Image (cartoon, rainbow, N blue to C red):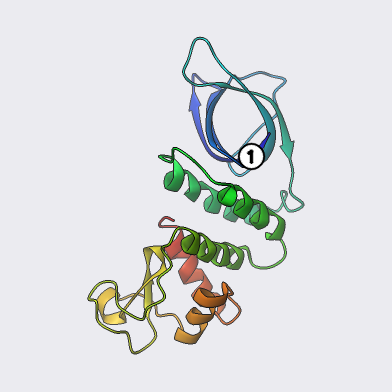
Amino acid sequence: MQGFIINLNRVKEEDLIVTIISKSSLDTLYRFYGSRHGTINIGFKIDYEIEPSSKSTISRLKDVIHIGYKWINDPKKLQLWQQFISLFHQHLKEAEELSEFYFELLERASKQWDKQNPKRIAIELYMELLEYEGRLHHDDICFLCSNKIESDPSIIRAFLPTHFHCNKTMTINHKALKELYTNKSSLFLSDKEVDRLWHVLLEGL
């Protein structure tokens, strides 16, 4: 089976607890250290097998093969990818069931990551996630004071709109934001606005 590593915890020196998003599940597995084992890291896509353990409630991760990306050797793109994919661990760690949506979203992201500014890709795909989960907020109503927003809004976590005077953070062009919310496109956002939305995204999904 295949999946994306979204979290690593080191235990007993070099052993690892690994959390992986696959097509149908969120797997938390134990990986024993071995000199013949290849290095794995957050964000890697891997092919792997699960071996149940009679001594532990955590199954063993085995037969790991790293499936590389074309851009894997670009440190900046890799850093952004690891920041983005790490958000899914906190968001999904309590999930008892998982649809294919999250795996497929990361699959598309990994294939697009070197096609344009990765921050734009992450922001556009995040809009799809919000819509899928029923959390995409289309109304021009301030989340903090519940009054109508008549000018360019400020954006807070989950990309909720607020008045500038309620939030005191950088505003985002209203028309550009509408394009993002409606068509999942960052085309009309400036690079500065993208950087602001990326900062908001890193607060959590």
Q: Secondary structure at mark 1?
A: strand
Horizontally, residue 71 falls left or right of residue 141, namely right
Q: Residue at x 37, y 77 (%)?
A: 154
From the image, which quarter does the C terminus lie in? Answer: bottom left
Q: How many marks?
A: 1
**Residue lying at the far right of the rendered structure:** 70
Instruction: Between residue 79 and residue 125, name the one nearer to us.
Output: 125
On the image, the x and y values in percent for residue 112 come to: 70, 60
Q: Quadrant of residue 137?
A: bottom left
- Circle 1 packing at 10 Å, graded few (<14), some (14-19), many (20+), is many
On the image, the x and y values in percent for residue 42 come to: 58, 41
Q: Residue at x 54, y 14 (%)?
A: 53
Q: Residue at x 37, y 78 (%)?
A: 139
On the image, the x and y values in percent for residue 64 come to: 69, 28
**As drawn, 79 above or below 41:** below
Instruction: Between residue 93 and residue 9, name the one nearer to us.
Output: 93
Horizontally, residue 197 falls left or right of residue 104, namely left
Horizontally, residue 108 falls left or right of residue 132, namely right
**As drawn, 178 above or below 37:** below
Question: Where does label 1 land, which residue?
Answer: 3
**As drawn, 138 above or below 86:** below
**Residue lying at the far bottom of the rendered structure:** 150
**Residue lying at the far top of the rendered structure:** 55
Q: Residue at x 52, y 82 (%)?
A: 176
Q: Amino acid at mark 1?
A: Gly
From the image, which quarter does the N terminus lie in? Answer: top right
**As drawn, 184 above or below 96:** below
